[in-house]
Structure formats: C-alpha cells, structure tokens
C-alpha cells in the first residue's frame, strides 16, 4: 500500500457542550498525526447514556461555532441525519464508503470510552473500518486482563507512521496537554447561576445564554 496516505480523523462525543478540552485535543491530534482534517461528530442518540438535555441540533450548532475559524476542524453532522441510535460503527461504514478503501481513517476516543468498548455495538468491527486513536488522561491505565486487554495487545502500535501506511487496523495512544475541563462541570456551573467563561469559546457561551440552555 502507498506510503504517503493522508489520514482523516473523526472524533465522536455528545459535546454537551463542546469546550476547550475537546478543541485543544482535536487540534493537537491534527498536528501530531498530520491529519488532513478532523471532524467532531456529535452523537444524536447516545446508546450508553440518557439523551442529553440539549438537542442534537443545538449541540451541533455549538460545535460549528467553536470550529469555524480552524480549517482543520469541522462538524460532522451525519449522526443527526440518521434515524435510530447513533452507533459509531454505522458512521464509520458511511465514512469508509465516502472515502474509499485506500484512505486512512482514524477514530478518536477518550480513554474512558476505550475501557468499555466491548459493550459497543459491533465493536470488533471497528478496526476493520478505521484506526483508533485513544486520548490518554493523566493517571489512567490499560486493563490488565480480559477481552479488551487482549484486543489492545493484538492491535496497539507505538508508531504514528502506521496512519500513513495503512488504512485501518491499529490502535494508537496519545498523551495530550491535560485540560481538566468537563461538559458536566460547565452544565453544573450554568445551573448554579455561575459563569463558565474561559472554559469554552465565547461564541458557544453566547449561544448557550441566548437559548437559556442548561438552566
């Protein structure tokens, strides 16, 4: 296979709301992995948690505001357009069909998602469609045994160049700048009548305040 593939990334999440932790990680991954682009893909109907108290359309609108000045980042709305539960494997199938079999595709996950990945719908097919890039948080560790540990051992690579050499099939772990910001914390601040300013882009906060979201 060609040694000069230009990888494309997709970063899924509820983004409820999107904040600087998401955005800084996305930008650092674009640079570290030399991604052509990275799509932030809001999950319309999460399969493993209750529906967010903010609509998928509103969450996507906030992502679009957050990334509008960064050409390497975009909002991928595909899960809003698809009915039913938002299963990641279905989104990867759509992306693979659009990009073709030879394009390198990377799915970005947080380490908490990875630890429970064996509960995902058709999870063992994910690496048949894409690479997986795990964002590691300070103090976290891999499982020592079990099906996820075996899966990691079989597919993990410490060589970023695999993204430019293969279209799918490898797991990379990246330790990025730690920003201790969470969407839960932002929602709690808003509900308490306190300001989350400087935890998320001003345009996103303006959107939240105009719509009286999370109150």
Image (cartoon, rainbow, N blue to C red):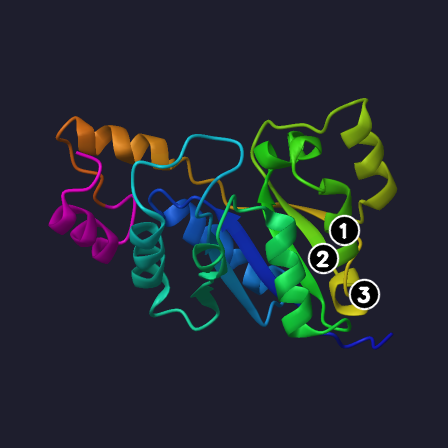
Q: Looking at the picture, does residue 59 appear above or below residue 36?
A: above
Please give left or right for residue 78 compared with residue 186 in the image. Answer: right
Residue 183, picture quadrant: top left
Q: What residue lies at 45% left-to-right and 60% top-to-bottom?
A: 81
- Circle 2 packing at 10 Å, graded few (<14), some (14-19), many (20+), is many
| Element assignment for label 2 | loop
Residue 200 lies in the magenta stretch:
yes
- Report the quarter where the C terminus lies: top left
- Circle 3 packing at 10 Å, graded few (<14), some (14-19), many (20+), is many
Report the magenta residues as a range.
Answer: 198-215
User: Which is nearer the eye, 120 or 203?
Assistant: 120
Q: Tell me where residue 193 appears, x and y as whole percent.
A: 12, 30
| Element assignment for label 1 | helix
Q: Tell me where residue 45 appears, x and y as whole percent.
A: 45, 43
Disc 1 and disc 2 in contact, CB within 8 angstroms: yes
Q: Tell me where residue 78 appears, x and y as whole percent.
A: 49, 61
Q: Which numbered disc covers residue 166?
A: 3
Q: What residue lies at 80% left-to-right and 54% top-to-bottom?
A: 169
- 3D distance between C-alphas at marks 2 and 3: 9 Å
> Is residue 165 something that shows in the picture?
yes
Residue 41 lies in the magenta stretch:
no
Q: Which numbered disc covers residue 187?
A: none
Q: What residue lies at 21% left-to-right and 44% top-to-bottom?
A: 197
Q: Tell me where residue 171 appears, x and y as whole percent.
A: 75, 48
Q: Which numbered disc covers residue 127?
A: 1
- Report the quarter where the N terminus lies: bottom right
- Circle 1 packing at 10 Å, graded few (<14), some (14-19), many (20+), is many
Q: What residue lies at 30% left-to-right and 58% top-to-bottom?
A: 61
User: Which is nearer the eye, 20 or 58?
Assistant: 58
**Mark 2 highlights which residue?**
130
> Is residue 6 something that shows in the picture?
no
Please give left or right for residue 32 compared with residue 72 in the image. Answer: right
């Amino acid at each position: 296979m060609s040694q000069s593939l230009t990888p494309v990334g997709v970063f899924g999440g509820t983004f409820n709301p999107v904040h600087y932790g998401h955005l800084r990680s996305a930008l650092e991954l674009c640079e570290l992995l030399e991604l052509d682009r990275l799509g932030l893909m809001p999950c319309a109907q999460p399969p493993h948690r209750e529906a967010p108290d903010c609509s998928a359309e509103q969450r996507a609108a906030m992502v679009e505001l957050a990334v509008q000045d960064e050409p390497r980042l975009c909002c991928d709305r595909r899960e809003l357009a698809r009915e039913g539960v938002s299963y990641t494997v279905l989104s990867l199938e759509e992306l693979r069909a659009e990009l073709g079999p030879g394009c390198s595709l990377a799915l970005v996950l947080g380490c908490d998602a990875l630890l429970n990945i064996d509960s995902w719908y058709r999870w063992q097919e994910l690496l048949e469609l894409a690479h997986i890039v795990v964002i590691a948080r300070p103090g976290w560790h891999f499982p020592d045994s079990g099906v996820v540990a075996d899966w990691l051992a079989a597919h993990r690579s410490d060589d970023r160049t695999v993204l430019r050499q293969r279209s799918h099939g490898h797991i990379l772990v990246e330790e990025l700048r730690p920003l201790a910001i969470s969407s839960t914390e932002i929602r709690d601040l808003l509900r308490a009548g306190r300001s989350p300013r400087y935890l998320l882009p001003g345009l996103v906060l303006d959107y939240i305040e105009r719509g009286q979201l999370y109150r």
